């Protein structure tokens, strides 16, 4: 810088000694250049006094500190960002859970209403079953009072529950319970569906053990298995049917209907048929299974009792039914030729008694011969 200033000074002095118009301008420029060089020299001296290395080191140190702080702040910012993301996820999850909670609350209310309706329906079913049973017992008592010397009816509650027992057995199929079919039958006999469901819902294995006289541990397994079964509540639709036992007195000896002949079964079942009702009753040739004594003693007498309130239609070859039953209308059927029926003859008993005598009694001569033979017995 000093050499440059001396060179400029020398050049300025040279120009000042030359008296030319151009040199004056050059001299002026050189003077300005010399002033700038001196200013630069002063600045150089000033800069030389500044401890650049120390300041640079300090600046580097400050930069490192600032950079460390910046790095830490970046990390903190990333941490905050992660927390914000997690917070957003948590917020959304909380919103979802609140929605689920509202839905659960609503479902719980609906479930409560449905349970209440179900309990009301169960109560109603139980009431109706009781009413049906009482009605059946009442009807059986009426028939026993009227036909007790011939048949005896006994109504047993819930004793005829095979479909119900089969369904319970199906539910127990995967339980690995010993004698599960036998247990199913016992359950179906001891408890109606509503009662069994209540026991299972309450986990009352002790009650089952007492009812069935079985091991408590086994009943605990049954209750636990059925309680978790997805089809358990299908039992709500099962009927708990009553059973009807029919006993017939054969010459004073009581016999179950299952042990009777076909004719005796018809005799035993007739009291169930000869009841007051709103629909017509059609009986096809009852004499095929009933003896004449029973037809007169039971059938004919009950025809007189029932026909004022119920229409009775008999297809018969037995004269006792239309004659002693006082038929209001007789329809005489016959064939015009083997492949064609003739037009039926209609009329009340007085109008058609000739047909009755001819077709059902075998004709006048046959009737008179029987009368002659029976006269000593009648007297």
Image (spheres, rainbow, N blue to C red):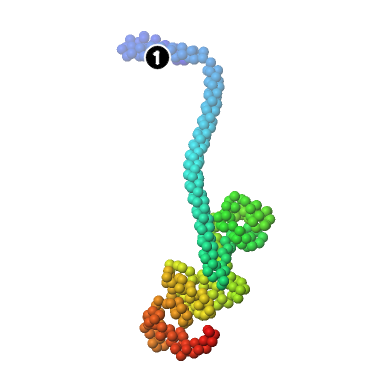
Using the image as rendered, state which of residue 207 and residue 296 is in the foreground: 296
The location of residue 52, given as percent across then percent down, is 52, 18
- As displayed, is residue 311 above or below residue 199? below
The residue where tag 1 is placed is 33
Is residue 243 shown to the viewer in this render?
no
Q: Secondary structure at mark 1?
A: helix
Residue 299 seen in this snapshot: yes
Residue at coordinates 51% horizontally, 70% vertically from top-left? 272
Along the line of sight, the residue nearer the viewer: 220 or 213:
213
Residue 284 location, x and y as percent?
Answer: 47, 77
Q: Nearer the viewer, residue 375 or 149?
A: 375
Q: Nearer the viewer, residue 342 or 209?
A: 342
Dividing the picture into quadrants, the one containing residue 233 is: bottom right
Residue 115 shown left or right of residue 174 in the figure: left
Residue at 50%, 49% in the rendered image: 116
Q: Where does residue 349 sit, x and y in percent of width and height?
A: 40, 80
């Amino acid at each position: 810088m000093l050499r440059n200033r001396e060179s400029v000074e020398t050049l300025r002095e040279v120009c000042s000694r030359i008296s030319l118009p151009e040199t004056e301008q050059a001299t002026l420029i050189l003077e300005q250049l010399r002033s700038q060089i001196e200013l630069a020299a002063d600045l150089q001296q000033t800069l030389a006094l500044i401890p650049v290395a120390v300041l640079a080191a300090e600046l580097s140190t400050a930069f490192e500190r600032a950079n460390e702080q910046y790095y830490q702040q970046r990390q903190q910012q990333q941490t905050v960002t992660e927390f914000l993301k997690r917070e957003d996820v948590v917020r959304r999850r909380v919103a979802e859970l609140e929605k689920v909670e509202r839905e659960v609350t609503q479902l719980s209310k609906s479930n409560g209403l449905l349970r209440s309706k179900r309990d009301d329906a169960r109560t109603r079913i139980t009431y109706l079953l009781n009413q049906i049973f009482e009605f059946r017992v009442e009807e059986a008592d009426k028939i026993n009072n009227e036909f007790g010397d011939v048949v005896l009816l006994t109504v047993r509650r819930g004793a005829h529950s095979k479909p119900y027992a089969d369904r319970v057995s199906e539910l127990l199929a995967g339980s690995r319970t010993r004698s599960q079919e036998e247990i199913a039958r016992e359950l179906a006999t001891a408890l109606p569906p509503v009662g069994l469901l209540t026991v299972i819902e309450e986990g009352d294995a002790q009650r089952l053990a007492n009812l069935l006289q079985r091991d408590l541990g086994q009943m605990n397994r049954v209750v636990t298995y059925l309680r978790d079964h997805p089809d358990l509540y299908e039992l709500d639709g099962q009927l708990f049917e009553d059973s009807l036992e029919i006993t017939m007195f054969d010459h004073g000896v009581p016999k179950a209907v299952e042990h009777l002949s076909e004719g005796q079964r018809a005799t035993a079942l007739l009291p169930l048929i000869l009841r007051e009702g709103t629909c017509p009753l059609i009986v096809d040739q009852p004499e095929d299974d009933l003896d004449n004594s029973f037809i007169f003693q039971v059938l004919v007498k009950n025809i007189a009792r029932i026909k004022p309130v119920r229409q009775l239609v008999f297809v018969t070859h037995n004269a006792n039914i239309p004659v002693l039953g006082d038929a209001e209308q007789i329809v005489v059927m016959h064939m015009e030729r083997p492949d064609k029926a003739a037009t039926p003859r209609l009329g009340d008993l007085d109008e058609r008694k000739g047909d009755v005598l001819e077709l059902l009694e075998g004709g006048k001569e046959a009737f008179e011969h029987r009368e002659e033979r029976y006269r000593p017995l009648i007297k």
